[in-house]
Image (cartoon, rainbow, N blue to C red):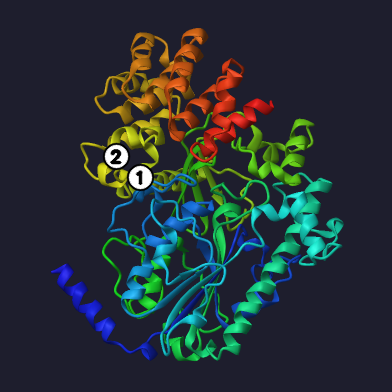
Amino acid sequence: MKHLIFSIVLFSSIALSATDRPNILWITSEDNSAYYMSCYGNENAQTPHIDQLAQVGNRYTHAYSNAPVCAVTRSTLLTGVYAVTQGTLHMRSRYPIPERFRPYTHYLKNVGYYCTNNDKTDYNFKGDDKSYWDECSKQAHYKNRGTDQPFFAIFNLTSSHEHCLFPDSVERYREQGVIPQQNRVPPSEVIVPPLYPDTPEIRQDIANYQDAVTRMDKEVGALIKELEEQGLSEDTIIFYYSDHGGILPRSKRYLYETGTRVPLIISFPEKWKHLAPAPAGQPVEETVSFVDFPATLLALAGIAKPEQMMGRTFLGETKEKAKDPYVFLHGDRFDEFYKFNRGITDGKYRYIRNFLPHQSAALRIAYPFRMNAWNSYKDAWKNGQTNAQQAQVWQATQPIEELFDTENDPWELTNLATDPNYKELLMNMRKVLIRKMVELNDLGFFPEAMFKERCGDGPVTTFAAQATNYPIEEIVEIAMLAGEGNPSSKEAFAEALQSNDPIIRYWALMAYSITPSLAVGNKPAIGSLMNDPFSANRIRASQVMHQLGHPELATEKLLEILYEANSDEILTLVLNVFDDIGETQRIPKSNLTKIKNEQKNLPYASQLATGFLEK
Protein backbone atom coordinates (compact mmCIF):
# COMPACT_ATOMS: atom_id res chain seq x y z
CA MET A 1 0.00 0.00 0.00
CA LYS A 2 2.87 2.39 0.83
CA HIS A 3 4.34 1.84 -2.64
CA LEU A 4 0.93 2.37 -4.25
CA ILE A 5 0.40 5.66 -2.42
CA PHE A 6 3.92 6.80 -3.30
CA SER A 7 3.32 5.95 -6.97
CA ILE A 8 0.07 7.93 -7.02
CA VAL A 9 1.75 10.95 -5.43
CA LEU A 10 4.68 10.69 -7.82
CA PHE A 11 2.35 10.41 -10.84
CA SER A 12 0.40 13.46 -9.72
CA SER A 13 3.70 15.32 -9.25
CA ILE A 14 4.79 14.50 -12.79
CA ALA A 15 1.46 15.74 -14.11
CA LEU A 16 2.21 19.27 -12.86
CA SER A 17 3.46 21.72 -15.46
CA ALA A 18 6.93 23.22 -15.24
CA THR A 19 5.49 26.61 -14.30
CA ASP A 20 3.96 25.03 -11.18
CA ARG A 21 7.38 24.18 -9.77
CA PRO A 22 9.90 26.60 -8.30
CA ASN A 23 13.46 26.80 -9.48
CA ILE A 24 15.80 26.03 -6.59
CA LEU A 25 19.31 27.45 -6.26
CA TRP A 26 21.73 26.15 -3.62
CA ILE A 27 24.80 28.28 -2.94
CA THR A 28 27.25 26.50 -0.67
CA SER A 29 30.47 27.73 0.84
CA GLU A 30 33.15 25.67 2.50
CA ASP A 31 34.54 25.48 6.00
CA ASN A 32 32.82 28.42 7.63
CA SER A 33 30.93 28.49 10.88
CA ALA A 34 27.84 30.63 11.32
CA TYR A 35 29.90 32.84 13.61
CA TYR A 36 31.89 34.34 10.72
CA MET A 37 28.85 36.02 9.13
CA SER A 38 27.85 39.56 10.01
CA CYS A 39 24.18 38.59 10.18
CA TYR A 40 25.11 35.99 12.80
CA GLY A 41 26.67 38.64 15.02
CA ASN A 42 30.35 38.84 14.06
CA GLU A 43 31.49 42.45 14.45
CA ASN A 44 34.58 41.88 12.28
CA ALA A 45 32.62 40.42 9.38
CA GLN A 46 31.74 42.17 6.14
CA THR A 47 29.16 40.03 4.36
CA PRO A 48 26.63 42.47 2.84
CA HIS A 49 25.20 40.12 0.22
CA ILE A 50 24.54 37.29 2.68
CA ASP A 51 23.15 39.86 5.15
CA GLN A 52 20.77 41.13 2.47
CA LEU A 53 19.63 37.59 1.72
CA ALA A 54 18.85 37.17 5.42
CA GLN A 55 16.78 40.37 5.37
CA VAL A 56 14.58 39.20 2.51
CA GLY A 57 14.62 35.55 3.59
CA ASN A 58 14.88 33.54 6.79
CA ARG A 59 18.04 32.98 8.80
CA TYR A 60 18.18 29.68 10.68
CA THR A 61 19.82 30.08 14.08
CA HIS A 62 20.26 26.36 14.80
CA ALA A 63 21.27 24.63 11.58
CA TYR A 64 23.88 21.88 11.74
CA SER A 65 26.10 19.69 9.65
CA ASN A 66 25.78 16.16 11.03
CA ALA A 67 29.53 15.66 10.60
CA PRO A 68 32.28 18.30 10.76
CA VAL A 69 34.02 17.36 7.52
CA CYS A 70 33.06 17.74 3.86
CA ALA A 71 32.92 14.40 1.98
CA VAL A 72 31.06 12.71 4.83
CA THR A 73 28.46 15.48 4.97
CA ARG A 74 28.00 15.44 1.19
CA SER A 75 27.03 11.78 1.26
CA THR A 76 24.18 12.64 3.63
CA LEU A 77 23.27 15.80 1.73
CA LEU A 78 22.91 13.83 -1.50
CA THR A 79 20.93 10.83 -0.25
CA GLY A 80 19.12 11.98 2.88
CA VAL A 81 20.59 9.01 4.76
CA TYR A 82 22.92 9.38 7.73
CA ALA A 83 26.52 8.59 6.86
CA VAL A 84 26.73 6.30 9.88
CA THR A 85 23.85 4.27 8.45
CA GLN A 86 25.00 4.01 4.84
CA GLY A 87 28.68 3.35 5.60
CA THR A 88 30.04 6.70 4.36
CA LEU A 89 31.18 7.90 7.78
CA HIS A 90 34.93 7.80 7.15
CA MET A 91 36.52 10.74 5.35
CA ARG A 92 37.16 10.05 1.65
CA SER A 93 36.15 6.42 1.47
CA ARG A 94 34.58 4.78 -1.54
CA TYR A 95 32.49 1.92 -0.22
CA PRO A 96 29.36 0.93 -2.13
CA ILE A 97 25.96 1.87 -0.76
CA PRO A 98 22.63 0.12 -1.45
CA GLU A 99 20.99 1.06 -4.73
CA ARG A 100 17.86 2.20 -2.90
CA PHE A 101 19.82 5.11 -1.39
CA ARG A 102 19.30 7.17 -4.51
CA PRO A 103 20.42 10.79 -4.74
CA TYR A 104 17.75 13.47 -4.73
CA THR A 105 18.60 14.34 -8.34
CA HIS A 106 17.08 11.01 -9.38
CA TYR A 107 13.67 12.20 -8.19
CA LEU A 108 14.06 15.76 -9.45
CA LYS A 109 15.02 14.65 -12.95
CA ASN A 110 12.10 12.21 -13.02
CA VAL A 111 9.68 15.14 -12.80
CA GLY A 112 11.50 17.28 -15.33
CA TYR A 113 14.04 19.31 -13.38
CA TYR A 114 17.31 20.26 -15.03
CA CYS A 115 19.97 19.50 -12.42
CA THR A 116 23.40 21.14 -12.51
CA ASN A 117 26.38 21.06 -10.18
CA ASN A 118 29.22 23.57 -10.39
CA ASP A 119 31.24 21.62 -9.60
CA LYS A 120 32.30 19.87 -6.37
CA THR A 121 31.23 16.25 -5.93
CA ASP A 122 33.27 14.24 -3.38
CA TYR A 123 30.28 12.11 -2.32
CA ASN A 124 32.24 9.50 -0.38
CA PHE A 125 30.69 6.37 -1.88
CA LYS A 126 31.41 4.16 -4.85
CA GLY A 127 30.08 5.37 -8.19
CA ASP A 128 30.41 8.02 -10.87
CA ASP A 129 29.70 11.27 -9.03
CA LYS A 130 29.05 13.22 -12.22
CA SER A 131 26.47 10.75 -13.49
CA TYR A 132 23.80 12.07 -11.09
CA TRP A 133 23.65 15.42 -12.87
CA ASP A 134 22.53 16.81 -16.22
CA GLU A 135 25.68 18.93 -16.02
CA CYS A 136 28.57 18.65 -13.60
CA SER A 137 31.61 20.82 -14.35
CA LYS A 138 33.06 24.26 -13.77
CA GLN A 139 30.85 25.43 -16.63
CA ALA A 140 27.65 23.73 -15.44
CA HIS A 141 24.78 26.23 -15.40
CA TYR A 142 21.01 26.33 -15.21
CA LYS A 143 20.90 28.60 -18.29
CA ASN A 144 21.51 25.54 -20.46
CA ARG A 145 18.14 23.99 -19.55
CA GLY A 146 15.24 23.55 -21.93
CA THR A 147 12.54 26.16 -22.52
CA ASP A 148 10.27 26.56 -19.46
CA GLN A 149 12.16 23.73 -17.72
CA PRO A 150 12.52 24.18 -13.95
CA PHE A 151 16.02 23.87 -12.59
CA PHE A 152 17.85 22.80 -9.49
CA ALA A 153 21.40 24.17 -9.42
CA ILE A 154 24.27 24.06 -6.93
CA PHE A 155 27.22 26.42 -7.00
CA ASN A 156 29.97 25.32 -4.61
CA LEU A 157 32.21 28.18 -3.49
CA THR A 158 35.66 27.12 -2.28
CA SER A 159 37.19 30.50 -1.43
CA SER A 160 36.69 30.05 2.34
CA HIS A 161 38.08 26.49 2.34
CA GLU A 162 40.77 25.56 4.87
CA HIS A 163 43.55 25.94 2.32
CA CYS A 164 42.86 29.70 2.10
CA LEU A 165 44.90 30.13 5.30
CA PHE A 166 47.95 28.28 4.08
CA PRO A 167 50.72 30.91 3.65
CA ASP A 168 51.28 30.15 -0.04
CA SER A 169 47.54 30.51 -0.72
CA VAL A 170 47.36 33.84 1.11
CA GLU A 171 50.29 35.13 -0.94
CA ARG A 172 48.78 33.91 -4.20
CA TYR A 173 45.34 35.40 -3.50
CA ARG A 174 46.89 38.76 -2.66
CA GLU A 175 48.85 38.71 -5.92
CA GLN A 176 45.63 37.87 -7.78
CA GLY A 177 43.82 40.74 -6.07
CA VAL A 178 40.98 38.57 -4.71
CA ILE A 179 41.86 39.54 -1.15
CA PRO A 180 43.41 42.89 -0.15
CA GLN A 181 47.14 43.43 0.17
CA GLN A 182 46.51 44.73 3.69
CA ASN A 183 43.87 43.04 5.85
CA ARG A 184 40.53 44.82 5.87
CA VAL A 185 40.49 44.39 9.66
CA PRO A 186 44.04 44.80 11.04
CA PRO A 187 45.19 41.76 13.05
CA SER A 188 45.54 44.00 16.11
CA GLU A 189 41.80 44.75 15.97
CA VAL A 190 40.32 41.30 15.33
CA ILE A 191 38.26 39.56 17.97
CA VAL A 192 40.13 36.50 19.27
CA PRO A 193 37.68 33.89 20.61
CA PRO A 194 38.58 32.80 24.16
CA LEU A 195 39.24 29.20 23.11
CA TYR A 196 42.52 30.37 21.51
CA PRO A 197 45.68 31.82 23.01
CA ASP A 198 46.15 35.39 21.81
CA THR A 199 49.17 35.02 19.53
CA PRO A 200 50.22 37.14 16.52
CA GLU A 201 49.82 34.15 14.19
CA ILE A 202 46.29 33.42 15.35
CA ARG A 203 45.34 37.08 15.01
CA GLN A 204 46.80 37.14 11.51
CA ASP A 205 44.92 34.03 10.43
CA ILE A 206 41.64 35.38 11.81
CA ALA A 207 42.18 38.58 9.81
CA ASN A 208 43.07 36.57 6.71
CA TYR A 209 40.00 34.39 7.15
CA GLN A 210 37.70 37.39 7.45
CA ASP A 211 39.07 38.58 4.10
CA ALA A 212 38.38 35.15 2.59
CA VAL A 213 34.80 35.23 3.89
CA THR A 214 34.28 38.69 2.41
CA ARG A 215 35.61 37.38 -0.91
CA MET A 216 33.15 34.48 -0.68
CA ASP A 217 30.29 36.89 0.09
CA LYS A 218 31.03 38.78 -3.14
CA GLU A 219 30.75 35.50 -5.04
CA VAL A 220 27.36 34.87 -3.41
CA GLY A 221 26.29 38.35 -4.49
CA ALA A 222 27.41 37.71 -8.07
CA LEU A 223 25.32 34.52 -8.28
CA ILE A 224 22.23 36.31 -6.95
CA LYS A 225 22.77 39.23 -9.36
CA GLU A 226 23.12 36.81 -12.27
CA LEU A 227 19.82 35.18 -11.31
CA GLU A 228 18.16 38.61 -11.33
CA GLU A 229 19.69 39.51 -14.70
CA GLN A 230 18.33 36.27 -16.13
CA GLY A 231 14.85 37.34 -14.98
CA LEU A 232 14.55 34.29 -12.75
CA SER A 233 14.65 35.70 -9.23
CA GLU A 234 10.86 35.75 -8.88
CA ASP A 235 10.65 32.05 -9.70
CA THR A 236 13.59 30.79 -7.62
CA ILE A 237 13.99 29.70 -4.01
CA ILE A 238 17.55 30.37 -2.81
CA PHE A 239 19.44 28.44 -0.13
CA TYR A 240 22.77 29.63 1.21
CA TYR A 241 24.68 27.40 3.64
CA SER A 242 28.18 26.12 4.38
CA ASP A 243 29.21 22.47 4.29
CA HIS A 244 30.31 22.46 7.97
CA GLY A 245 32.11 24.69 10.44
CA GLY A 246 35.73 25.71 10.46
CA ILE A 247 38.49 26.47 9.75
CA LEU A 248 40.50 27.79 12.66
CA PRO A 249 41.66 25.38 15.39
CA ARG A 250 39.13 23.20 17.22
CA SER A 251 36.42 23.74 14.65
CA LYS A 252 36.52 21.68 11.44
CA ARG A 253 36.70 17.96 12.40
CA TYR A 254 35.32 18.67 15.90
CA LEU A 255 31.75 18.15 17.13
CA TYR A 256 31.58 21.53 18.84
CA GLU A 257 29.50 24.50 17.69
CA THR A 258 32.54 25.76 15.78
CA GLY A 259 32.67 22.53 13.76
CA THR A 260 29.01 21.73 13.15
CA ARG A 261 26.83 24.84 13.44
CA VAL A 262 26.45 26.34 9.98
CA PRO A 263 24.89 29.44 8.48
CA LEU A 264 21.64 28.64 6.67
CA ILE A 265 19.56 31.29 4.94
CA ILE A 266 16.59 30.50 2.70
CA SER A 267 14.86 33.12 0.59
CA PHE A 268 11.46 32.73 -1.08
CA PRO A 269 10.17 34.99 -3.88
CA GLU A 270 6.64 36.34 -3.55
CA LYS A 271 5.20 33.55 -5.71
CA TRP A 272 6.42 30.90 -3.28
CA LYS A 273 6.07 32.79 0.04
CA HIS A 274 3.42 30.31 1.15
CA LEU A 275 6.19 27.71 1.46
CA ALA A 276 8.35 29.88 3.73
CA PRO A 277 8.68 29.09 7.45
CA ALA A 278 8.12 32.69 8.60
CA PRO A 279 7.71 36.25 7.32
CA ALA A 280 10.72 37.69 5.47
CA GLY A 281 13.52 38.81 7.74
CA GLN A 282 12.35 36.77 10.71
CA PRO A 283 14.88 34.25 12.06
CA VAL A 284 13.90 30.60 12.53
CA GLU A 285 14.98 28.91 15.75
CA GLU A 286 13.99 25.28 15.16
CA THR A 287 16.85 22.76 14.85
CA VAL A 288 17.54 21.41 11.36
CA SER A 289 20.44 19.41 9.98
CA PHE A 290 21.79 18.19 6.67
CA VAL A 291 19.93 14.87 6.79
CA ASP A 292 16.73 16.96 6.49
CA PHE A 293 17.79 18.84 3.36
CA PRO A 294 17.03 16.25 0.63
CA ALA A 295 13.49 15.52 1.82
CA THR A 296 12.85 19.25 2.17
CA LEU A 297 14.23 19.96 -1.29
CA LEU A 298 11.92 17.36 -2.82
CA ALA A 299 8.93 18.72 -0.90
CA LEU A 300 9.55 22.21 -2.30
CA ALA A 301 9.53 20.65 -5.76
CA GLY A 302 6.22 18.92 -5.04
CA ILE A 303 7.71 15.43 -4.68
CA ALA A 304 6.78 13.04 -1.86
CA LYS A 305 9.56 11.98 0.47
CA PRO A 306 11.06 8.64 -0.61
CA GLU A 307 10.73 5.92 2.00
CA GLN A 308 14.48 5.53 2.62
CA MET A 309 15.17 9.19 3.39
CA MET A 310 15.78 9.56 7.11
CA GLY A 311 15.40 13.31 7.60
CA ARG A 312 12.24 15.32 8.04
CA THR A 313 10.67 17.83 5.68
CA PHE A 314 11.08 21.17 7.45
CA LEU A 315 9.57 23.40 4.74
CA GLY A 316 6.66 23.41 2.35
CA GLU A 317 3.13 22.13 2.28
CA THR A 318 4.13 18.71 3.62
CA LYS A 319 6.23 20.07 6.48
CA GLU A 320 6.74 17.50 9.25
CA LYS A 321 6.92 18.18 12.95
CA ALA A 322 10.17 17.04 14.54
CA LYS A 323 9.88 13.92 16.71
CA ASP A 324 12.33 15.54 19.10
CA PRO A 325 14.55 18.64 18.98
CA TYR A 326 17.84 16.72 18.88
CA VAL A 327 20.31 16.81 16.02
CA PHE A 328 22.63 13.80 15.77
CA LEU A 329 26.36 14.52 15.28
CA HIS A 330 29.24 12.17 14.51
CA GLY A 331 33.01 12.15 13.93
CA ASP A 332 35.01 9.15 12.74
CA ARG A 333 38.18 8.80 10.65
CA PHE A 334 39.53 12.16 9.53
CA ASP A 335 42.07 11.51 6.78
CA GLU A 336 44.79 9.29 8.26
CA PHE A 337 43.73 9.48 11.91
CA TYR A 338 41.01 7.49 13.67
CA LYS A 339 38.72 9.37 15.98
CA PHE A 340 35.33 8.26 17.24
CA ASN A 341 32.86 10.50 19.00
CA ARG A 342 29.14 11.10 18.91
CA GLY A 343 26.93 13.95 19.99
CA ILE A 344 23.49 15.50 20.08
CA THR A 345 22.29 19.06 20.43
CA ASP A 346 18.89 20.65 20.88
CA GLY A 347 20.25 24.11 20.06
CA LYS A 348 20.78 25.02 23.71
CA TYR A 349 22.63 22.05 25.18
CA ARG A 350 25.21 19.85 23.49
CA TYR A 351 26.25 16.40 24.70
CA ILE A 352 29.37 14.68 23.32
CA ARG A 353 30.54 11.14 24.02
CA ASN A 354 34.21 10.38 23.38
CA PHE A 355 34.62 6.66 22.73
CA LEU A 356 38.42 6.94 22.63
CA PRO A 357 39.09 9.16 25.67
CA HIS A 358 42.68 7.98 25.93
CA GLN A 359 43.53 9.96 22.80
CA SER A 360 44.35 13.63 22.60
CA ALA A 361 41.67 15.74 20.92
CA ALA A 362 44.36 17.30 18.74
CA LEU A 363 44.30 15.36 15.49
CA ARG A 364 47.54 13.80 14.32
CA ILE A 365 46.98 14.69 10.69
CA ALA A 366 49.24 16.78 8.51
CA TYR A 367 46.81 18.91 6.51
CA PRO A 368 45.54 21.48 9.05
CA PHE A 369 49.07 22.06 10.35
CA ARG A 370 49.86 23.76 7.08
CA MET A 371 48.19 26.84 8.60
CA ASN A 372 50.08 29.05 11.03
CA ALA A 373 47.27 29.23 13.59
CA TRP A 374 47.38 25.53 14.45
CA ASN A 375 51.18 25.57 14.83
CA SER A 376 51.10 28.71 16.93
CA TYR A 377 48.42 27.18 19.16
CA LYS A 378 50.55 24.07 19.67
CA ASP A 379 53.68 26.10 20.41
CA ALA A 380 51.80 28.24 22.94
CA TRP A 381 50.66 25.10 24.72
CA LYS A 382 54.17 23.62 24.76
CA ASN A 383 55.51 26.89 26.18
CA GLY A 384 52.90 27.05 28.94
CA GLN A 385 51.11 30.02 27.40
CA THR A 386 47.62 28.49 27.36
CA ASN A 387 45.06 28.45 30.14
CA ALA A 388 43.46 25.20 31.33
CA GLN A 389 40.58 25.39 28.85
CA GLN A 390 42.81 26.19 25.88
CA ALA A 391 45.20 23.39 26.84
CA GLN A 392 42.46 20.75 26.99
CA VAL A 393 42.66 19.93 23.28
CA TRP A 394 46.32 18.92 23.65
CA GLN A 395 45.95 16.80 26.79
CA ALA A 396 46.80 13.11 26.48
CA THR A 397 43.34 12.11 27.67
CA GLN A 398 39.92 13.63 27.10
CA PRO A 399 36.68 13.64 29.10
CA ILE A 400 34.46 10.67 28.32
CA GLU A 401 31.44 12.96 28.38
CA GLU A 402 31.09 16.64 27.60
CA LEU A 403 28.02 18.76 28.23
CA PHE A 404 27.79 22.41 27.27
CA ASP A 405 25.22 25.15 27.59
CA THR A 406 25.82 26.60 24.13
CA GLU A 407 23.36 29.41 24.69
CA ASN A 408 25.32 30.88 27.61
CA ASP A 409 28.71 29.37 26.75
CA PRO A 410 28.89 29.59 22.94
CA TRP A 411 32.61 28.72 22.81
CA GLU A 412 31.98 25.57 24.90
CA LEU A 413 34.62 26.29 27.50
CA THR A 414 32.86 24.92 30.60
CA ASN A 415 32.14 21.20 30.65
CA LEU A 416 29.04 20.66 32.80
CA ALA A 417 29.19 16.85 32.69
CA THR A 418 30.55 16.60 36.23
CA ASP A 419 28.33 19.36 37.65
CA PRO A 420 25.72 17.72 39.95
CA ASN A 421 23.21 20.41 38.98
CA TYR A 422 23.15 18.97 35.46
CA LYS A 423 23.12 15.26 36.36
CA GLU A 424 19.52 14.69 35.25
CA LEU A 425 20.06 16.51 31.95
CA LEU A 426 23.29 14.57 31.36
CA MET A 427 21.58 11.22 31.94
CA ASN A 428 18.69 12.14 29.67
CA MET A 429 20.94 13.27 26.82
CA ARG A 430 23.07 10.15 27.22
CA LYS A 431 19.93 8.02 26.86
CA VAL A 432 18.83 9.96 23.79
CA LEU A 433 22.24 9.47 22.17
CA ILE A 434 22.20 5.71 22.86
CA ARG A 435 18.70 5.45 21.41
CA LYS A 436 19.69 7.31 18.27
CA MET A 437 22.84 5.24 17.71
CA VAL A 438 20.80 2.05 17.97
CA GLU A 439 17.99 3.35 15.75
CA LEU A 440 20.48 4.42 13.09
CA ASN A 441 22.35 1.09 13.26
CA ASP A 442 25.44 3.24 13.71
CA LEU A 443 28.34 1.70 11.78
CA GLY A 444 30.94 3.65 13.71
CA PHE A 445 31.36 0.68 16.05
CA PHE A 446 32.26 -1.52 13.07
CA PRO A 447 36.06 -1.25 12.62
CA GLU A 448 36.81 0.04 9.13
CA ALA A 449 39.61 -2.53 8.82
CA MET A 450 36.88 -5.22 9.03
CA PHE A 451 34.64 -3.78 6.33
CA LYS A 452 36.00 -5.72 3.38
CA GLU A 453 37.02 -8.75 5.44
CA ARG A 454 33.40 -9.23 6.54
CA CYS A 455 31.39 -7.69 3.69
CA GLY A 456 33.55 -8.32 0.63
CA ASP A 457 32.69 -5.84 -2.12
CA GLY A 458 29.08 -5.43 -1.01
CA PRO A 459 27.58 -2.53 0.98
CA VAL A 460 28.41 -2.59 4.67
CA THR A 461 24.87 -1.38 5.30
CA THR A 462 23.33 -4.47 3.72
CA PHE A 463 25.54 -6.78 5.77
CA ALA A 464 24.90 -4.89 9.02
CA ALA A 465 21.14 -4.77 8.46
CA GLN A 466 20.96 -8.37 9.72
CA ALA A 467 20.93 -8.35 13.51
CA THR A 468 22.93 -11.57 13.63
CA ASN A 469 25.72 -9.82 11.71
CA TYR A 470 25.62 -6.59 13.68
CA PRO A 471 23.99 -6.88 17.13
CA ILE A 472 23.94 -3.12 17.60
CA GLU A 473 22.45 -2.96 21.11
CA GLU A 474 25.01 -5.37 22.53
CA ILE A 475 27.85 -3.62 20.67
CA VAL A 476 26.81 -0.16 21.90
CA GLU A 477 26.56 -1.45 25.46
CA ILE A 478 30.12 -2.86 25.51
CA ALA A 479 31.52 0.18 23.67
CA MET A 480 29.95 2.56 26.20
CA LEU A 481 31.58 0.60 29.00
CA ALA A 482 34.92 0.44 27.19
CA GLY A 483 35.77 4.10 27.64
CA GLU A 484 34.82 4.32 31.29
CA GLY A 485 37.65 2.19 32.69
CA ASN A 486 35.50 0.96 35.54
CA PRO A 487 36.90 -2.10 37.38
CA SER A 488 33.33 -3.31 37.92
CA SER A 489 33.16 -4.03 34.17
CA LYS A 490 36.11 -6.47 34.17
CA GLU A 491 33.84 -9.49 34.02
CA ALA A 492 31.85 -8.03 31.14
CA PHE A 493 35.05 -7.42 29.15
CA ALA A 494 36.39 -10.92 29.87
CA GLU A 495 33.11 -12.37 28.61
CA ALA A 496 33.10 -10.11 25.55
CA LEU A 497 36.63 -11.26 24.74
CA GLN A 498 35.22 -14.75 24.17
CA SER A 499 32.28 -13.60 22.03
CA ASN A 500 31.56 -15.21 18.67
CA ASP A 501 31.03 -11.73 17.27
CA PRO A 502 34.35 -10.16 16.16
CA ILE A 503 33.11 -6.60 16.75
CA ILE A 504 32.29 -7.35 20.38
CA ARG A 505 35.73 -8.90 20.74
CA TYR A 506 37.17 -5.74 19.22
CA TRP A 507 35.51 -3.50 21.79
CA ALA A 508 36.70 -5.69 24.66
CA LEU A 509 40.22 -5.19 23.31
CA MET A 510 39.58 -1.46 23.01
CA ALA A 511 38.55 -1.40 26.69
CA TYR A 512 41.91 -2.94 27.59
CA SER A 513 43.76 -0.57 25.28
CA ILE A 514 42.09 2.43 26.94
CA THR A 515 42.63 1.07 30.47
CA PRO A 516 45.38 -1.61 30.42
CA SER A 517 44.97 -2.40 34.12
CA LEU A 518 41.63 -4.04 33.33
CA ALA A 519 43.44 -6.64 31.21
CA VAL A 520 45.51 -8.06 34.06
CA GLY A 521 44.66 -11.74 34.40
CA ASN A 522 43.47 -12.07 30.80
CA LYS A 523 46.82 -12.24 29.02
CA PRO A 524 46.27 -15.78 27.63
CA ALA A 525 42.93 -14.82 26.04
CA ILE A 526 44.35 -11.56 24.69
CA GLY A 527 47.41 -13.35 23.34
CA SER A 528 45.20 -15.82 21.51
CA LEU A 529 43.46 -12.93 19.74
CA MET A 530 46.78 -11.97 18.19
CA ASN A 531 45.80 -14.76 15.79
CA ASP A 532 42.17 -13.70 15.43
CA PRO A 533 40.68 -14.19 11.93
CA PHE A 534 40.20 -10.43 11.62
CA SER A 535 43.07 -7.99 11.17
CA ALA A 536 41.59 -5.27 13.41
CA ASN A 537 41.47 -7.69 16.34
CA ARG A 538 45.00 -8.94 15.74
CA ILE A 539 46.21 -5.34 15.68
CA ARG A 540 44.37 -4.32 18.85
CA ALA A 541 45.39 -7.49 20.72
CA SER A 542 49.01 -6.77 19.83
CA GLN A 543 48.63 -3.21 21.08
CA VAL A 544 47.30 -4.44 24.42
CA MET A 545 50.09 -7.01 24.78
CA HIS A 546 52.59 -4.20 24.20
CA GLN A 547 50.92 -2.18 26.95
CA LEU A 548 51.07 -5.23 29.25
CA GLY A 549 54.84 -5.45 28.95
CA HIS A 550 55.44 -7.64 25.89
CA PRO A 551 56.85 -5.16 23.35
CA GLU A 552 58.88 -7.64 21.29
CA LEU A 553 55.99 -10.09 20.86
CA ALA A 554 53.58 -7.26 19.99
CA THR A 555 55.90 -5.49 17.56
CA GLU A 556 56.71 -8.76 15.78
CA LYS A 557 52.99 -9.42 15.21
CA LEU A 558 52.31 -5.85 14.08
CA LEU A 559 55.17 -6.02 11.59
CA GLU A 560 53.81 -9.33 10.29
CA ILE A 561 50.43 -7.69 9.69
CA LEU A 562 52.12 -4.69 8.09
CA TYR A 563 54.08 -6.88 5.66
CA GLU A 564 51.00 -8.93 4.67
CA ALA A 565 48.38 -6.17 4.44
CA ASN A 566 47.45 -4.70 1.07
CA SER A 567 44.46 -2.52 1.98
CA ASP A 568 44.55 1.10 3.01
CA GLU A 569 42.17 0.45 5.92
CA ILE A 570 44.32 -2.22 7.55
CA LEU A 571 47.60 -0.43 6.91
CA THR A 572 46.20 2.85 8.26
CA LEU A 573 45.08 1.14 11.45
CA VAL A 574 48.32 -0.74 12.03
CA LEU A 575 50.38 2.42 11.40
CA ASN A 576 48.17 4.35 13.82
CA VAL A 577 48.85 1.70 16.46
CA PHE A 578 52.61 1.79 15.81
CA ASP A 579 52.37 5.52 16.49
CA ASP A 580 50.23 5.00 19.61
CA ILE A 581 52.75 2.63 21.20
CA GLY A 582 55.78 4.69 20.17
CA GLU A 583 57.36 2.05 17.94
CA THR A 584 57.40 3.73 14.52
CA GLN A 585 61.19 3.46 14.46
CA ARG A 586 60.84 -0.33 14.32
CA ILE A 587 59.27 -0.20 10.86
CA PRO A 588 61.92 -0.68 8.16
CA LYS A 589 62.34 2.47 6.10
CA SER A 590 62.11 0.40 2.94
CA ASN A 591 58.55 -0.60 3.90
CA LEU A 592 57.58 2.95 4.76
CA THR A 593 59.01 4.17 1.45
CA LYS A 594 57.05 1.51 -0.43
CA ILE A 595 53.82 2.55 1.30
CA LYS A 596 54.60 6.25 0.78
CA ASN A 597 54.93 5.70 -2.97
CA GLU A 598 51.49 4.06 -3.17
CA GLN A 599 49.56 7.32 -2.78
CA LYS A 600 46.88 6.38 -5.29
CA ASN A 601 46.06 2.97 -3.82
CA LEU A 602 46.93 3.69 -0.18
CA PRO A 603 46.15 7.39 0.31
CA TYR A 604 46.03 7.52 4.10
CA ALA A 605 48.60 4.86 4.89
CA SER A 606 50.82 6.78 2.49
CA GLN A 607 50.31 10.01 4.45
CA LEU A 608 51.22 8.25 7.69
CA ALA A 609 54.31 6.64 6.14
CA THR A 610 55.42 10.03 4.82
CA GLY A 611 55.10 11.54 8.28
CA PHE A 612 57.05 8.70 9.89
CA LEU A 613 59.87 9.08 7.38
CA GLU A 614 60.07 12.80 8.05
CA LYS A 615 60.36 12.40 11.84
* Residue 345 visible in the snapshot: no
Residue positioned 47% across, 29% down in the render: 571
Point out the tag, 1 or 2, that comes first from the N-terminus: 1
Residue positioned 51% across, 90% down in the render: 234
Residue indicated by mark 1: 442
- x, y (%) of residue 445? 38, 37
- x, y (%) of residue 129? 43, 59
Question: What SS does tag 2 mark?
Answer: helix
- x, y (%) of residue 194? 72, 49
The amino acid at mark 2 is Ile
Q: Is residue 591 shown above or below 200?
A: above
Q: Nearer the viewer, residue 451 or 191?
A: 451
The amino acid at mark 1 is Asp
Q: Residues within 10 Å of mark 1 (few under 14, many from 20)?
A: many
Q: Is residue 328 shown above or below 588?
A: below
Question: Is the C-beta separation of discs 1 and 2 under 8 Å?
Answer: yes
Residue 407's image quarter? bottom right
Residue indicated by mark 2: 472
Q: Residues within 10 Å of mark 2 (few under 14, many from 20)?
A: many
> In 3D space, how far apart are the residues under numbered discs 1 and 2 (Cα atoms)?
8 Å
